Structures are given as C-alpha cells and as structure tokens.
Amino acid sequence: FDTFIAQNDYYVQFLQTNFFTGFQTTPESAKPLAEIENGYDFEGIYRFQTASFEDSITVNKGFVQKFPWPADKPIEILFIDIAKTHRTNDFCVSNYFPAMIPGKTILIQQDLYTFLGYLHLIMEYFADYFDVLVPQVGTSRVYLYKKEIPADLIKTAVAEYMDVSNGVPLYKSILEKSSDHEKPLFHAAFVHYLSDVGEKDLCREEADRCLSLYDNDGGQAYWHKVIAGKILPGLDKVS
C-alpha cells in the first residue's frame, strides 16, 4: 500500500540521493543525474527495485484507507510500516486486527518512534492479547497474537485509548513491564505524549526523571536528543 508520490522534502531528498545521483569515489564527486520535485510519482522505481519478487507482491496504489481488508481473509504476518498518523493507525487496528489468527499471526510494529505514541498505547491497551517475541530493536518490536480480541473491544479501543485518562496509566504500565534496554525509548515517548496532550507539569517531571535515569551515550542517544533538544526547549518557550 502506497501512494508512490513524493509528498514532501524528505521523500524528494531520499529519492534524489538514492536514485538520481551519480557517485564516483567520494561524496564530493556526487552529481545529480536528474532533478525531481514534490509530486514525483516513484511507482516505476519501486517496481524496478522489486521486479525479482513481483509474483509475490500485490501493489495497491493509493491511500490505504481505500483498500478495506476482508475479515475472513486471514493474515499470518502483519508488518505495519504505514501508521505515520493517528488516523492511519486506527484504520490498521480496525481493518487488519480482526483478520489475525490467534496463536499464529506475527505482528511487526515498525515505527515505535517517540512521537508516534498511539502505537505504544494501542499495543499496551491490547497487552493481554499479545506476547512480545522480539523486544525493541531500533524502533521496531515483534509480537505474537496469542488470543482473539473481541470485536467490540477493538471499537472501544479506537475510541478511547489516546485519552489522557487512559494514556497515562497505559504508559506507566509499559514502563513497568519493558526491559532495561527498552525503557529509555518508551520513557521518552511518554514524555513526548505528555507534551502533546498539554500535561506540561507532568511532562517536565517525567523528562527530568528520564534524563537522570538512563545513559545518554554522551548526548547522542535518540531519546536524549528528543527530550533535551526538542521537548524541554518547547516547554520553556511556552512557559
């Protein structure tokens, strides 16, 4: 599922660097082979890069919400790399979770970035229905769907899981259960969530705790850059 349209500068730069730039021996020798702009359709690049596997791939071009998945078509492996917005995440939960197979389906959440808190919260909301197979690697986590989620609970979850009354205890539950390796990322995500929902005092309190608890790799750790470089300066600006 993809629109295959370069919709912003990030997409344009990525495509320009990786597919439309010629390199000789050093980065300084790089030369543009062609200039692309916002709105560029890169479906052709995708099809060329995946040509060896075309018999195993079904391409659905357009917004994912236009392609409902039938609940009676089971999903054995669900790799979610499109939940870049709250709305798209809710669609994935409502659309794909009912087709998962209890005791069999493997779910890979690819984008557990600190600023996509809805991914952490929805998985904790459904914690009783999943086992963590592979703890956080980068910003990914792998789960086993162990028992069926009632259909009415999926509807309830989408309606309420982001509410502060649910979000705060859900994040505290995540931190209690996560491994030492995972805690810095999830704690920073909690701080980010509190900032997003306007809980400034609690946000500052948790930010200070986060900065004091974990090794920040000389200030280079991703979570540390998020808190010290973005969230706290934003709070100071508002204050």
Image (cartoon, rainbow, N blue to C red):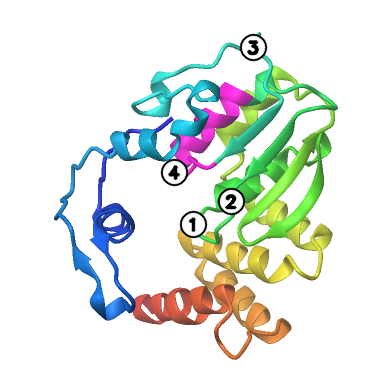
Q: Which residue bears the numbered disc 2?
A: 164
Estimate the x, y position of residue 206 in percent, counting from the top left.
63, 74
Label 1, label 3: how far apart the Cα atoms are? 37 Å
Q: Give the spatial CA distance, label 1 vs label 2.
A: 7 Å
Question: Which residue is tagged 3?
Answer: 73
- Mark 3 → mark 4, Cα distance in angstroms: 25 Å
Q: Is residue 218 left or right of residue 74?
A: left
Q: Which residue is mark 1?
A: 197
Q: Which residues are magenta?
A: 81-96
Is the residue under label 4 in contact with that under label 1 (CB below 8 Å)? Answer: no
Q: Which residue is mark 4?
A: 85
SS at badge 3: loop
Q: Residue at x 71, y 81 (%)?
A: 214
Q: Nearer the viewer, mark 1 or mark 4?
A: 4
Q: Residues within 10 Å of mark 3 (few under 14, many from 20)?
A: few
Residues at marks 4 and 2, CA–CA distance in whole angstroms: 18 Å
Residue 99 percent coordinates (x, y): 67, 19
Tag 4: Cα neighbours inside 10 Å, few (<14), some, or many (≥20)?
few
Tell me the mark number nearer the camera, choosing from 1 and 3.
3
Which of label 3 and label 4 is nearer to you? Answer: 3
CA distance for labels 3 and 2: 35 Å
Q: Earlier in the sequence, mark 3 or mark 4?
A: 3
User: What's under tag 4, amino acid-wise?
Assistant: Thr
Answer yes or no: do the residues labelled 1 and 2 have beta carbons within 8 Å? yes
The answer to whether residue 32 is above or below residue 37 is below
Identify the mark at residue 2; answer none if there is no mark.
Answer: none
The amino acid marked with disc number 3 is Lys
> CA–CA distance between discs 1 and 4?
15 Å
Residue nearest the observer in this picture, 124 or 134: 134
Locate residue 154, reporting x and y percent. 65, 26
Q: Amino acid at mark 2?
A: Val
